Amino acid sequence: MWGLKVLLLLPMASFALYPEEILDTQWELWKKTYGKQYNNQVDETSRRLIWEKNLKHISIHNLEASLGVHTYELAMNHLGDLTSEEVVQKMTGLKVPPSRSRSNDTLYVPDWESRAPDSIDYRKKGYVTPVKNQGQCGSCWAFSSVGALEGQLKKKTGKLLNLSPQNLVDCVSENDGCGGGYMTNAFQYVQKNRGIDSEDAYPYVGQDESCMYNPTGKAAKCRGYREIPEGSEKALKRAVARVGPVSVAIDASLTSFQFYSKGEERPLYSSHPCPMMWAAAPRRPQAPRVPSPRTYMASARGKHAAATRPAANPLSRQDPAGALLPRGTPRGGPGAAESSSLLVCVLGVYYDENCNSDNLNHAVLAVGYGVQKGRKHWIIKNRY
C-alpha cells in the first residue's frame, strides 16, 4: 500500500510539468489500485477530470506543507474521482433536525469539582472497536451511535463488542436509513426497543432493508443519554473524560478532509479540530483553541451528548472487522479518524480554517483528546 502511495505522490510537486503519458500511467495505476470501473468512456473522462483536479490540489497543498504553510499532508485515495460535494452526499448522512428543545432529564451536568485529565485516549483503554467500512450509505449517524454504545458496554461489562449499525439503519423509523439520520433518534430507538443486536447477529450490508431485529441477538441496552451544554468545551472535555466516547458531528465537506493523509508527527490517530460549537473559527490557525466537534445532540444551535449506562448481555465473538480495512491501515484501533478520505486519516493533527461550524453533515465519534506540540485537539474515530 505504501509503495503505491509513493508511486502516486512523488511526482506531485511538478504536477504542471507532467506529460500526458505520465498522467495516463498514474490514472491507470489509481484505477487498478482501487478497483475503479466506469460505465462508458464519457463517464470515465468526466471522472478523470475530477481526479486530475484533486491531484493538482493535493500537489499544491503538499508543496505548501513542505514550505511550512500547512502542518499536514494530503494523499490520493479511493475518493479521488469524487468532488467534495459528492463525498458529502454519498458518504456522510447526518440530518440535524431544524430545532430541538432541551429536556432537563437529558441534560449532562459536569463534575466541576474534580479536574479533568490533560489527555485521554480510549483506544488505549480498549473502549474502541476497529474502523468499519460505511460504503456508499449515509449511515454515519448509525456508526457514531453504535460507537458510543460500544464504549459504554466496555465500561460496564469489561467486554468490547461490535454492535450492529445495520440494526439502526433498518429499524430507526424516525431516521431515513442510508438517506441519513440523527443520533438522538438512534439512542431513543435502542432505549425503547430495549436492546440492539450485535454485528454478528445483524451484519452490516450498507443498504436499506426491512427491520430484522431479533432479541436473541441482543448485545446491549441503552438506559439513557445526556446532552452536554451548548458551546461548552469544558463540559465536553469532562464528558469524554468521565463518561467515555461521545458521538459528535463535524463539517466533512472540505477537500482537505477528503484527502487528509498525515501531519507533522505520527500518532496512530488523527484529530479534527474544527470548531463545531463556536460561531467563529480560531483567528490564528497556527495556535488554534481547543477544537469543539459537536456531539450526536448537535441541533441547529448545537448540543453535546453522550450515550450513558447501557445494560448488556454481551455475545462473545471473534472480531473480523480488521479484514475490512485497506492494506496498510493500522489495525490497533479506529485507525485515526480517517479524516481525509473519511477513510485513511492516519497521522497528525488536522486543521482547516475554512471549516464551517454551521455546516454539520457528518457524524463521527470522539474517543479522546490531548495536546500535540502545544495544539489542543480531539481524537476522532471515523469510517472509510
Image: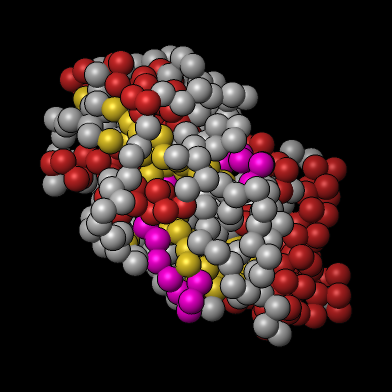
Which SS does the magenta portion mostly show? strand
Which of these two is toward me, 181 or 214?
Answer: 181
Horizontal side of residue 17 vs 122, given as left or right: right
**What segment is highlighted magenta in the picture?**
357-375
- Is 215 rendered above or below residue 178? above
- Quarter of the image for residue 96 reads top right
- Quarter of the image for residue 371 reads bottom left
Q: Position of residue 130 (x, y in %)?
A: 34, 51
Question: Farthest residue in the bottom direction?
Answer: 67
Would you say residue 129 sits in the magenta stretch?
no
Would you say residue 369 sits in the magenta stretch?
yes
Q: Position of residue 238 (x, y in %)?
A: 34, 52
Horizontal side of residue 336 vs 72, given as left or right: left
Residue 200 visible? The answer is no
Q: Residue at x 38, y 44 (%)?
A: 246
Q: Residue at x 34, y 67 (%)?
A: 118
Q: Residue at x 41, y 23 (%)?
A: 103
Question: Farthest residue in the front direction?
Answer: 113
Q: Position of residue 286 (x, y in %)?
A: 63, 74
Q: Residue at x 78, y 49 (%)?
A: 47
Residue 117 visible? The answer is yes
How is the rendered protein coloured?
Answer: secondary structure
All told, the count of numbered labels is: 0
Q: Position of residue 375 (x, y in %)?
A: 50, 72
Which of these two is toward me, 349 or 333?
Answer: 349
Which of these two is toward me, 300 or 113?
Answer: 113
